[in-house]
Image (spheres, rainbow, N blue to C red):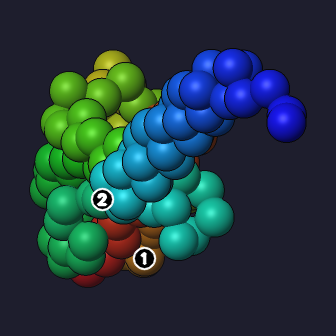
Amino acid sequence: MPDHRGLPNQHLKLTAQLGLAAMVTLFLAGYLAACKNFLAFDPCAVRLTVDPKLDSVAVGAAVTFNATAQGGCAGLTTGPGIRAIWVSRDTTIARLVPPASGPSVVAIALRPGRVAIVVTAAGAEGSGILQVR
């Protein structure tokens, strides 16, 4: 007759290993499900939203652009307190009032035309358009 004395210990070890594997699987599934950008194949991507998206003003007017960051790992929202760098794509149409870093920036309309006001933060980019009449 075979000796079955080691069988209960092997069964307990197998049960413990399966339990650990199940816990790790559930943790990963929960983490990935909480990540808003997981299906975009970049689970830690940040998306920048600029407000206003489009504004039209006369020469000499000032417009404040605001950026909000959303996303990141586990779907965190970093909100308006982001560290950002702003640029005007055409400084002959609109210039930015220093400092051009932070969650908002003021653009001064210099001459008629259309210019993108671009913000970069956390590896992402967003923009708003300023139409100067």
Q: Amino acid at mark 1?
A: Gly
For the point 59% across and 26% down, the residue is 8
For the N terminus, the image quarter is: top right
Picture coordinates of residue 84 (x, y %)? 41, 31
Residue for badge 2: 49
Q: Amino acid at mark 2?
A: Thr
Q: Residue furthest right?
A: 2
User: How many residues crowd mark 2 within 10 Å: few (<14), some (14–19), many (20+)?
Assistant: some
- Total marks shown come to 2
For the point 36% across and 50% down, the residue is 30
Residues 40 and 30: in front is 30
Q: CA distance from mark 2 to mark 1?
A: 23 Å
Picture coordinates of residue 66 (x, y %)? 20, 47
Residue 5 to residue 80: above or below: above
Q: Secondary structure at mark 2?
A: strand
User: How many residues crowd mark 1 within 10 Å: few (<14), some (14–19), many (20+)?
Assistant: some
| Residue 128 visible in the picture | yes
Residue for badge 1: 113
| Residue 107 visible in the picture | no
For the point 54% across and 35% down, the residue is 15
Residues 111 and 122: in front is 122
Picture coordinates of residue 101 (x, y %)? 37, 25
Picture coordinates of residue 65 (x, y %)? 22, 50
Residue 102 to residue 38: above or below: above
Q: Secondary structure at mark 1?
A: strand
Q: Nearer the viewer, mark 2 or mark 1?
A: 2
Residue 102 to residue 26: above or below: above
Residues 75 and 121: in front is 75
For the point 25% across and 35% down, the residue is 78
**Earlier along the polypeptide chain: callout 2 or callout 1?**
2
